[in-house]
């Protein structure tokens, strides 16, 4: 090893879902929204003034912060925005998890959490989900340096009740608790209504799923003014201009079109529930997902072999080669037409292999 390599910060990186470059595929592996963004998004991008591109964007991201504050009934001082919820969550780890005590999160969850903990040298302990892939709230009663969990969880899709979420927060009022709600718009009840009751609560959401803007990278956190101020202080010390002007304009336009938001999320929910019924008839097992994906297994099929067979037919789903979940596939809910192709393949595959 060369001398300088001894001082390199080495981590095992997060591995994102595959992004195939060829066309004519059915892409059900990265939980993107199958429908286009709200019409106003395209209009906002077309109307961009070249003068805005020549200048630095607003470091306070005021147009987007105000839109989100209005949408959720908050003051602008209660909203923080960043480059996707990944950026927002990384800022949260850096800002709030510095006690030296281990932070707590589930053992089966968003796989970026342990990566950030390693990058920022934050000790952590993973709390096992139960056999139904549910969070055991009592596991979070012990002393810790902070708590984070997704609701609904990923990759399982399971959603904790708001009562259980509040119970975890109530037992951890001396640390910051982050509820990662990337999928909350597909059926869960948000913890947002608790932020005035608990000054240690941050609720993080994203535009990548329910608002069809994964390609623009927009995320946000909501909490009390003091937490948001601390986040902004770290952000301004790290990179003042995190959000570019086209993204700010497009994201604000997406927030304004509530009717389109309700229409597309409603479509996905209806398709998800239909697909659940058809998968049950085929013998697949899964929890009652409240997200825009299903986490499925079959007692007589090897998930990895099914994953590879789907891929040959240009149908992409997500496989995780990890303990407890290595015989499951995560399947994003696409359009009705895409899901019909997926289901037709499964019927043929089952007939040939069982």
Image (tube, grey):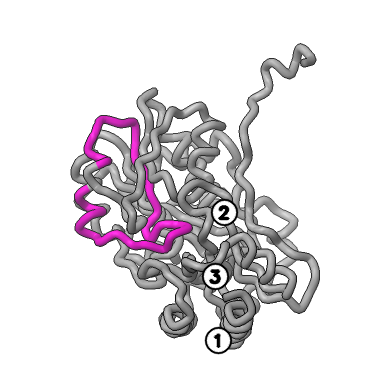
Q: What residue is shown with label 2?
A: 320
Residue 147 magenta: yes
Q: Which residue is found at the position 74% from the left and 56% from the top?
A: 54
For marks 2 and 1, the one nearer the N-term is 2
Label 1, secondary structure: give it.
helix
Secondary structure beneath dot 2 equals loop
Depth check, front residue: 235 or 338: 338
The residue located at (54%, 49%) in the rendering is: 86
Task: Looking at the picture, tell me which residue is in the foreground, 175 or 270.
Answer: 270
The mark nearer the N terminus, 2 or 3, is 2
Q: Is residue 109 magenta?
A: no
Q: Above or below — where is 113 with respect to 45?
A: above
x, y (%) of residue 230?
41, 38
Left or right: where 247 falls relative to 98: right
Q: Observer-nearest residue: 20 or 129?
A: 129
Disc 3 secondary structure class: strand
**Residue that mark 3 sits on:** 332
- Distance between the alpha carbons at the discs numbered 2 and 3: 14 Å
Mark 2 vs 3: CB contact within 8 A? no
Residue numbers of the magenta segment: 139-167
| Residue 79 in the image, given as x and y percentages of width and height | 40, 54
The residue labelled by disc 1 is: 336
């Amino acid at each position: 090893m060369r001398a300088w390599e001894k001082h390199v910060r080495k981590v095992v990186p997060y591995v994102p879902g595959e992004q195939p470059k060829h066309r004519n595929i059915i892409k059900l592996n990265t939980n993107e929204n199958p429908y286009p963004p709200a019409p106003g998004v395209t209009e906002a991008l077309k109307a961009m003034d070249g003068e805005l591109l020549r200048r630095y964007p607003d470091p306070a991201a005021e147009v987007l912060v105000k839109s989100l504050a209005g949408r959720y009934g908050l003051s602008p001082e209660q909203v923080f925005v960043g480059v996707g919820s990944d950026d927002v969550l990384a800022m949260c780890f850096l800002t709030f998890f510095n006690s030296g005590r281990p932070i707590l999160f589930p053992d089966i969850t968003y796989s970026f959490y342990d990566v950030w903990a390693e990058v920022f040298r934050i000790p952590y302990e993973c709390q096992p989900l139960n056999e139904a892939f549910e969070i055991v709230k009592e596991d979070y009663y012990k002393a810790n340096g902070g708590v984070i969990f997704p609701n609904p969880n990923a990759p399982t899709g399971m959603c904790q009740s708001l009562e259980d979420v509040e119970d975890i927060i109530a037992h951890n009022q001396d640390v910051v608790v982050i509820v990662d709600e990337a999928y909350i718009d597909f059926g869960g009840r948000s913890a947002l209504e608790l932020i005035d009751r608990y000054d240690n609560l941050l609720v993080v959401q994203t535009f990548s799923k329910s608002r069809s803007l994964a390609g623009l990278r927009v995320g946000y956190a909501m909490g009390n003014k003091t937490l948001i101020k601390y986040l902004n202080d770290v952000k301004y010390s790290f990179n003042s201009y995190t959000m570019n002007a086209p993204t700010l304009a497009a994201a604000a336009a997406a927030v304004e079109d509530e009717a389109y938001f309700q229409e597309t999320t409603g479509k996905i929910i209806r398709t998800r529930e239909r697909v659940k019924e058809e998968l049950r008839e085929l013998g697949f097992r899964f929890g009652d997902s409240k997200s825009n994906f299903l986490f499925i297994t079959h007692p007589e099929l090897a998930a990895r072999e099914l994953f590879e067979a789907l891929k040959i037919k240009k149908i992409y789903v997500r496989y995780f080669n990890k303990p407890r979940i290595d015989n499951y596939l995560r399947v994003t809910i696409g359009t009705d037409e895409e899901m019909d192709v997926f289901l037709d393949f499964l019927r043929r595959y089952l007939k040939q292999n069982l």
